[in-house]
Image (spheres, rainbow, N blue to C red):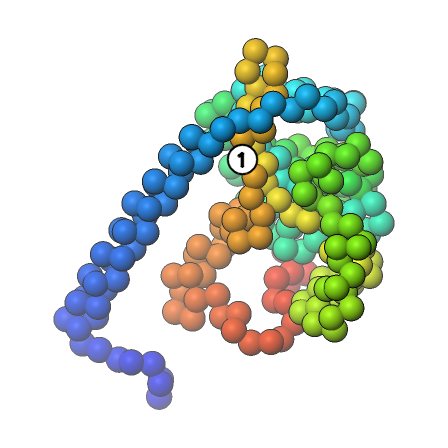
Amino acid sequence: MTEHKVATPEEWQTARDELLVREKELTRRSDELAREREELPWVRVDKEYSFDTEDGTKTLAELFDGRSQLMVYTFMFGPTYKAGCPVCSSGADTYDGAMPHLNARDVTFTCLSRGPLDKLLAYRDRMGWAFPWASSGETGFNSDFGAVHSEEALRPFLESGNLGPVPELAAACGVDPAAYVTEAPSLHAFALDDGVVYHTYSTTARGLEPLLSYYGILDRAPRGRDEGGAGPPWIRRHDEY
């Protein structure tokens, strides 16, 4: 018999109504934060970046593809990776469906990685995706926007002996833990105004959870994310479950 609390329909409804009050409070606060993001000051991007794309070399301004807003996700696929990060890949499964809706609101979305373009596109073909993906190579974009960790910065973590799921995720990418954690996932927003590119927003870590849309669904499942154990990472590429 289940060990979870069992209630009558009336008791459940009372508890649900109480929770709904707090859910609405969170929704309203989320709306407020969205407005505060829009009010952040912009920073002019004067440095010239060069990216390898399917359509040849492009500047940051050209990545906007004729629109005035650009979202860039730094997908963890480093120069020595054999395959993309499984966690980044799980989020990427939703990007194609979002593209028409983002484009309709004057937003271009692209993934960006330091790996060579031919590897990125071959992996994209394997996964069945079609969204834009560019290679930043050694252009400096990733380091300038905090999407690369230095060996010195990583040393305390790598020598701590407490790497969590990193070894398994690194192995899934065909690299060692140091090479894996050199890359960092992040999301960056840019605006193009009168030919000038401005950096408007960035986030990383748990700020990226909206890109992992399945978490929002799991949060409403009976056992939630069910990640409380210390076992290996459960997330796989969609063709590896």
Relative depth, front residue between 32 and 209: 32
Residue at 49% across / 70% down in the picture? 226
> For the residue labelled by badge 1, is the local secondary structure a helix, a strand or a loop?
strand
Relative depth, front residue between 73 and 174: 73
Q: Hey, which quadrant is residue 232 in on the image?
A: bottom right
- Given the current orientation, which residue lies at the most extreme right position? 80
Residue at 62% across / 44% down in the picture? 186
Relative depth, front residue between 47 and 126: 47
Q: Measuring from the top left, give residue 158's x and y in whole percent.
A: 77, 65
81 above or below 158? Answer: above
Say few, some or many: other residues with alpha carbon within 10 Å of mark 1 (under 14 / 14 to 19 / 20 or more).
some
Residue 10 in sight: yes
139 above or below 16? Answer: above
- Given the current orientation, which residue lies at the most extreme left position? 10
Q: Quadrant of the N terminus?
A: bottom left
- Given the current orientation, which residue lies at the most extreme bottom position? 1
31 above or below 139? Answer: below
Q: Measuring from the top left, give residue 102's x and y in whole percent.
A: 50, 30
The amino acid pointed to by label 1 is Tyr
Residue at 45% across / 61% down in the picture? 218
Q: Hey, which quadrant is residue 131 in on the image?
A: top right
Q: Measuring from the top left, give residue 202's x and y in whole percent.
A: 56, 39
Q: Measuring from the top left, give residue 237's x and y in whole percent.
A: 66, 56
Residue 54 in sight: no
Left or right: 29 as drawn, with respect to 117: left
Q: Quadrant of the C terminus?
A: bottom right
Left or right: 167 as drawn, with respect to 235: right
Relative depth, front residue between 232 and 2: 232
Q: Which residue is mark 1?
A: 201
Left or right: 96 as drawn, with respect to 176: left
Residue at 30% across / 45% down in the picture? 28
